Image (tube, helix red, strand yellow):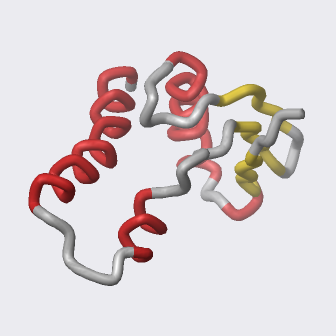
Amino acid sequence: MYQVAIKIINKDKVDEEDLAKYLPGEITILQRVSHPSIIDIYQIVETDPRCFFVTGIAENGCHLDYMMSRHSNILEAEGQYVFNQICQPFLIATFWA
């Protein structure tokens, strides 16, 4: 059995102009991109009031949880590694946009 996460966008709570401008681009990017730092998207379901993104789960948790679980400062090399992991998806999404 697969575990999935579901991201829900309530279209009623988003400005109609912003929705028309950004949602199609986000859908296109998520469908095209395949990268270890980006969660896979399995299905997108759009209804009148909502848009559901069925995605994989980040098996190792998110970077924020990792950083918050640390009870001491991290070394610079580890900080650079985590920072690069956080930045990579943005660079890829910008490329596909």
**Which residue is at a point 33% across and 39% down the rendered structure image?**
90
Q: Position of residue 82 (x, y in %)?
A: 27, 52
Counting the numbered discs, the total is: 0
Quarter of the figure with residue 31:
top right
Q: Residue at x 41, y 76 (%)?
A: 68
When asked about the image quadrant of residue 44, the answer is: top right
Q: Position of residue 70 (x, y in %)?
A: 36, 75
Name the residue nearer the viewer: 76 or 23: 76
The x, y position of residue 20, in whole percent, is 60, 39
Residue located farthest toward the top when viewing the structure as drawn: 32
Left or right position of 15 against 76: right
Q: Residue at x 43, y 65 (%)?
A: 66
Residue drawn at x 45%, y 29% is 36
The C terminus is located in which quarter? top left
On the image, the x and y values in percent for residue 26 come to 54, 34
Which residue appears farthest toward the bottom when viewing the image?
71
Residue 3 lies, with reference to residue 36, above or below; the image says: below
Foreground: 12 or 78? 78
Q: Quadrant of the N terminus?
A: top right
Whether residue 23 is situated above or below residue 13 in the rendered picture: above
Q: In the image, is 11 to the left or to the right of 73?
A: right
**Residue 82 to residue 97: above or below:** below
> Which residue is nearer to you in this view: 55 or 2?
2
Q: Is residue 96 left or right of residue 47?
A: left
